Image (tube, rainbow, N blue to C red):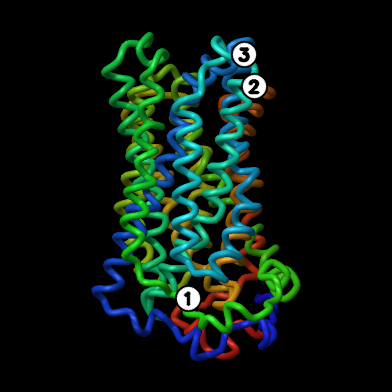
Amino acid sequence: MSIPSHQPSPSSVPSASSTSSASSASSPARRRQTIVATTIGNGLEFFDFTVYGFLALVIGKLFFPTFNSYGQLLLTVASFGVGFIMRPLGGIVIGAYADRAGRKKAMTLTIFLMALGCALIAFTPTYAAIGVAAPIVIVLARLIQGFSAGGEVGASTTLLVEHATPTNRGYMASWQFASQGLGVLLGAVVVGVLTSSLSPEAMLSWGWRVPFILGMLIAPVGMYIRRHLEESLHISPEQAAAPRESSLKIVCTQHGKTVLAAILSLVGGTTAAYVVTFYMPTYAVRELGFTPSVALFGAALTGLISFAFAPFVGKLSDTVGRKPLILWSRIALAVMIYPGFLWLNASPTPAVLFTVLGVFSVGLVAQTVPGITMLPEMFPKAVRASGMSLVYSVGVALFGGFAPFISTWLLNATGSKLAPAWYLVAMTLVSLLGLLWLRDHTGRDIDAAGAHAAA
């Protein structure tokens, strides 16, 4: 079943000449350059945004010391989730900026904001030094990072899709998720090296700040890399200066049903991503008794699988279609979640942890790559970054960023170590409802006239 959507009015969309597909003009060499530049820049962004999650236990002790260990963890994962509150606003503002000024300028802005958030965290004194001001600054930094991440995914995925041909959009877009895996891998490795090489006292004193100081390098490195990207949105000065209807208004009024169905379809993927990648290391340490080094190695494994496996899934989605791949991989993951948690709790060894995380990660990649490709395919070029950013940021904010918080709360409220598994299964099944109403654009020219007209 498809949800009807309507084309924007001619006055709100750049002319055909100005929006001629950048993908058709992009040579294979130019596409490879786009992949490399986007992957490195986006990987650095996600390193900055996600490394906070790997330091949850340390940050909890330093910035929420007046609470017991459970309260510290709950407040730390909540402050991790706070970063996602700003994602919808960042997606709306930066997405609209990307649709008006270009994808490159939007991606440069997100890099600067992410580096600013890292600097605030890196140099904020702890609660012992400045009291309640310390957690307030940390929350502010997470809000800035969330605003940045909300615009980054939409702008970078849109750029990759617009440099693709109709037959390789899945492969091109897969590098967005691969770069997220790269960021997770780098974050887990850096934190893991610090944890294993420093004493607990040194880690609490200064070691935890090192990843955020490294993350500040994103600004000069990322801006240099992205300066050489080829813009995929071409608007003449006259069109840029002409009055234009709000991108958000167009997306919500002319594509509102698609937006709602797409957000619902994201529930399973985003919940799984943040439980498997960011909550499981904390779960492994607190509930199963693993050392932090073992848990971080597991997190690095999930990042490595995402980075290595995503391009192959992208190519597969170009062959078999987005929806079939999402459907069957999501069902498979729902079937595997409970037995995986049950086995891990019955036999909590590193080998079992790595096996469970590896299987979960493959299922996660298989559904997320075609899912993230579908999002920009749903919207016409004039509002593509806005539509993609809105859907992704709202979906992740509501169901992804607070997944570690909800899992922690459920576990404590029920007393069952299997509570996160049931939550993950429920969200995975709910997300199948949204998938039913989305149109699959695999192999079609998404910039052709009538591509987004009513079905």
Residue drawn at point x = 70 percent, y = 63 percent: 260
Q: Residues within 10 Å of mark 3 (few under 14, many from 20)?
A: few
Residue drawn at point x = 47 percent, y = 84 percent: 445
Q: Is residue 325 visible?
A: no
Q: Up-down: is 75 above or below 240? A: above
Residue under numbered circle 3:
131
Q: Residue 51's spot in the image, x, y percent? A: 43, 34
The earlier-in-sequence mark between 2 and 1 is: 1
- Specify the quadrant of the image occupied by residue 95: bottom right
* On-image quarter of the N terminus: bottom right
Identified by mark 3, the residue type is: Gly
Identified by mark 1, the residue type is: Leu
Residue under numbered circle 1:
233
* On-image quarter of the C terminus: bottom right
Residue drawn at point x = 65 percent, y = 52 percent: 89
- Specify the quadrant of the image occupied by residue 291: top left
Any mark on residue 412, and which? 2
Identified by mark 2, the residue type is: Asn
**SS for dot 2:** helix
Q: Nearer the viewer, residue 386 or 401?
A: 386
Discs 1, 3 touching: Cβ within 8 Å: no
Position of 305 with respect to 233 (left or right) is left
Q: Is residue 365 visible?
A: yes
Label 2 or label 3, whichever lies nearer to me, is 3
Q: Residues within 10 Å of mark 2 (few under 14, many from 20)?
A: few
The earlier-in-sequence mark between 1 and 3 is: 3
Q: Nearer the viewer, residue 137 or 236?
A: 236
Q: What whole-number distance in Å separates the C-alpha atoms at marks 2 and 3?
A: 28 Å
Residue drawn at point x = 52 percent, y = 68 percent: 374
Q: Up-down: is 189 above or below 361? A: above
Position of 161 with respect to 453 (left or right) is left
The earlier-in-sequence mark between 2 and 3 is: 3
